[in-house]
Amino acid sequence: MPPIFRLRAAVATLVSIAVGFGVAIAQEQTTPGAMEPGAGGREMMERQMMCRADQHIDGQLAYLKTELKITAEQTPQWNVFADAFRADKEKNARLCKSTENEQTHAMMMSAGLPESLEMTAVRLAARLESLRAMEVAVRPLYAILSPAQKKTADEIMKGAPGF
């Protein structure tokens, strides 16, 4: 299967998961008792974790670099990847923090279905842009990795947040 079709299939899967997740949240919020104390705590915690994506970036990069056993010859391409990774995590954290306040959250929850879908589409578009930026940074690095390094990258980076 050509890479573009694999990418499209992956994007379609991500969109389906995100839409399903949005439906599940909407159902949970309309379920009797959803406003009881403690309800929505999981959602709030997930949102807070996403908003802290810019914390420990250097530690994450150090871990990846060590696990991948990046060589001196690979360091220039690693640095390009690391800069893109850092910029992406910082951008996503800023976006999340800008919508984290209670007033914005309340507005999102009280929006009608069309507006809610529009807000979800905007978030998904931002996520897709982020994935595409990471793909641009990963491809050249991945191309210069040894087979053993590629295996490690596949094991520890596939499915990880941001990839």
Image (cartoon, rainbow, N blue to C red):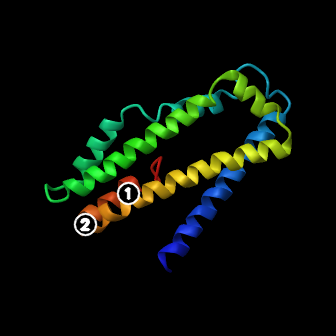
> Which residue matches tag 2?
144
Q: Nearer the viewer, mark 1 or mark 2?
A: 1
10 Å neighbourhood of mark 1: few (<14), some, or many (≥20)? many
Q: Secondary structure at mark 1?
A: helix
Q: From this viewpoint, which residue is outermost toward the bottom?
A: 1
Q: Earlier in the sequence, mark 1 or mark 2?
A: 1
Number of callouts: 2
> Which residue matches tag 1?
137
Q: Splitting the image into 4 quarters, where does residue 146 fall?
A: bottom left
Report the amino acid beneath label 2: Ile
Q: From this viewpoint, which residue is outermost toward the top?
A: 37
Report the amino acid beneath label 1: Ala
Q: Nearer the viewer, residue 130 or 33?
A: 130
What is the x, y in percent for residue 125? 62, 52
Q: What residue is at 46 percent from the left and 55 percent from the top?
A: 133
14 lies left or right of 55: right
Q: Are marks 1 and 2 in contact (CB under 8 Å)?
A: no
What is the x, y in percent for residue 148? 24, 65
Q: Secondary structure at mark 2?
A: helix
Between the residue at mark 1 and the residue at mark 2, the CA separation in whole angstroms equals 12 Å
Q: What residue is at 59 percent from the left and 69 percent from the top?
A: 9
Question: Is any part of residue 9 visible from this angle?
Answer: yes
Question: Is any part of residue 45 visible from this angle?
Answer: no
Figure check: 76 above or below 33: below
